[in-house]
Amino acid sequence: MGKVTAIVGKNGSGKTRYVEQMRHLMASDSVRYVAFCDSYGAQTDRAYYLQLRWNQHDIDQETPTVGDVLERNLIMTGPDTIERREYMTKLVETMGLTDSVDKYVIQISSGELRKLQLAKTLLSCPKTLIIDNPFIGLDRNTRIQLKEMLRQLADDEHIDIFIVVSRRGDIPDYVDDIVWITPREEFLASAPIVVDMRHVTIRYGSHTILNDINWTIREGEHWALLGPNGSGKSTLLSLICADNPQAYACDISLFGRRRGTGETIWDIKRRIGYVSPEMHRSYRHNLPAEQIVASGLKDTVGLYTRTNELEREKCRRWMGVFGLQGKECQPFLTLSSGEQRMVLLARAFVKDPDLLILDEPMHGLDDDNQQMVKDIIEAFSRRQGKTLIMVTHYDEELPECVNMRKVLGR
């Protein structure tokens, strides 16, 4: 299944420049870019000229049909094989162009022409497709059809799709990620605030750990918290996780409530999944691994209440996700360090938290397990309303969904 990303910004906000930089970084033959400046394509295109009704008297034997255009592009973009022709037939069906194959290009609607241009591009079998302004000039029903078609392409053809739009209403509801070129506050003003820190300062004696920190995190955002050792990252996370008593002396709101206004620590923790190296080092409970995972459902270090069968099934399912099948009954302290870390990650995910806080989640994992954890974080964070804060010292560990950064110690 391909990933769908929306690139959103007002006119003049720099979307085109961002896309150009992205294309330069990708620099691959498997990347295709399609821009729609108006309903009919570039005005230098003869199809655009003939599309104008007052020019249709110029139709001649050279005027192509939809089928002619696709045939020509099939030959231009690769070998003429049975497999590629079958793929072209499938594209025609997917695009809803079956009844238009024998029509002159000038006789099809703007929506059909848009689909034809995409079909031409897809004949080269790209792995990544960047579409600029795909919905401009289209009526409501055609926009709905095109959005569904793009979803189908991502799902069935495993194409990563970037959709560049200027209006929030043009963002398909199935996108996996949004890159905000225009300041996100102008688009996300209605998204609930998950974390709001204002002028937060933390001192221990004469030593200042955090100095005048301001940070607002909205629902659905995916942040990297970065900075050198000793810059205060863990302290900052402890304020969010309700572990640091100094939070009551600071201007901090979590999930819309100011700290110290009557909420309990457990009210906060039940919405947060958390793992860190400090948690791992201090976890000395030699319970069966499944019980360690289950403690995440109760927000306890050990497991002090019984779990029902549904909860145990959920724990086993998440252990399976992290490759821990068969380890359910093994005592935690007899597992390898990497397996212990995977158990604690399953513990963080098991309650399906609104806010996922991962402090160096891949610490000590081998290459294969690092990639697996990265993929799991990516898949989890794609879901609607899931908010992520991730700490790492290695940029390559960050999943693609992370598109915002908070850097300490600068």
Image (cartoon, grey):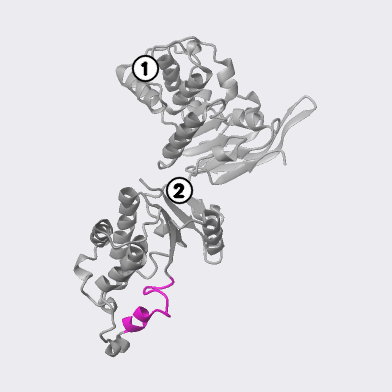
Q: Is residue 38 in the magenta section? A: yes
Dot 2 or dot 1: first in sequence order is: 2
Give how far across and how far down residue 234 sits, in percent: 63, 29
Residue 383 falls in which quadrant of the image?
Answer: top left
Q: CA distance from mark 2 to mark 1?
A: 34 Å
Q: Which residue: 50% across, 19% down?
A: 340
Q: Is residue 45 above or below residue 393?
A: below
Q: Is residue 47 left or right of residue 348?
A: left
Magenta highlight on residue 401: no
Instruction: Kindly identify which residue carries mark 1.
Output: 326
Depicted 34 relative to depicted 386: above or below: below
Q: Residue at x 62, y 42 (%)?
A: 406
Which labelled disc corresponds to residue 149?
A: none
* Neighbourhood count class around disc 1 (C-alpha, 10 Å): few under 14, some 14–19, many 20 upward: few
Q: Quadrant of the N terminus?
A: top left
Nearer to us in this view, 367 or 406: 367
Query: Residue 192 at what x, y percent from top left?
Result: 48, 43
Name the residue at 24% across, 66% down: 97
Compare residues 245 and 38 and report the one nearer the observer. Answer: 38
* Quarter occupied by the C terminus: top right
Q: Residues within 10 Å of mark 2 (few under 14, many from 20)?
A: many
Residue farthest toward the right in the current orientation of the protein: 206
The magenta span reads 37-52
Residue type marked 2: Asp
The answer to whether residue 347 of the structure is visible from this angle is: yes
Q: Foreground mark, 2 or 1?
A: 1
Which residue is the site of mark 2?
177
Q: Residue at x 32, y 67 (%)?
A: 75
Residue 90 rendering spot, x and y as whole percentages: 24, 58
Type of amino acid under label 1: Gly
- Residue 252: give x, y in percent of width and height: 61, 35
